[in-house]
Amino acid sequence: MRMLPAVKLVEALTTVITLAASVPVGLLASAILVVNNVRDIDTDRRAGKRTLAVRLGRERTRILFAAMVYGAFLLAP
């Protein structure tokens, strides 16, 4: 029964490592979706769609994209 705390420690560390590795990947995947929406801003606005890119505007959406890409590389383990 003395190994139970060690098992809990390994499980906790695995969760932290997994989270640390998955956040940069998620940011890059989301950045791809954001940059795709930049191209569609004009047509989405004409169609009445209220996407995040339409709500933010072209310049702030580009800033969001840059922040996501830079953030992914800064957070990479």
Image: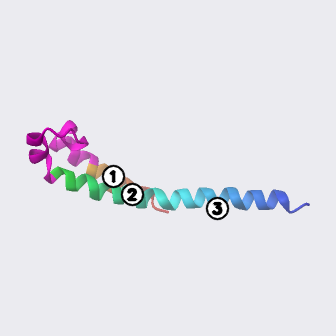
Front-lying residue, 67 or 7: 7
Report, in whole angstroms, how far the alpha carbon at label 3 lies from the one at label 2: 20 Å
The question of residue 58 being in magenta is answered with yes
Q: What residue type is labelled 3?
A: Thr
Image quarter of residue 42:
top left
Protein image colouring: rainbow
Q: Could you classify mark 3 by the number of other residues whose Cα lies within 10 Å: few (under 14), some (14-19), or many (20 or more)?
A: few
Left or right of 72 on screen, residue 59: left
Q: What stretch is highlighted in magenta?
A: 39-64
Element assignment for label 1: helix
Residue 48 location (% of width, % of height): 14, 38
Dot 1 or dot 3, earlier in sequence: 3
Left or right of 6 on screen, residue 31: left
Q: What residue type is labelled 1?
A: Met
Q: Name the residue under label 3.
A: 14
Residue 71 location (% of width, % of height): 38, 53
Q: Which amino acid does label 2 sit on?
A: Ala
**Residue at 17%, 43% in the rendered image:** 59
Pointer 1 with pointer 3, Cβ within 8 A: no
**Residue at 50%, 62% in the rendered image:** 21
Q: Mark 1 points at which residue?
A: 68
The tag on residue 72 is: 2
Depth check, mark 3 against mark 2: the one in front is: 3
Element assignment for label 2: helix
Q: Could you classify mark 1 by the number of other residues whose Cα lies within 10 Å: few (under 14), some (14-19), or many (20 or more)?
A: many
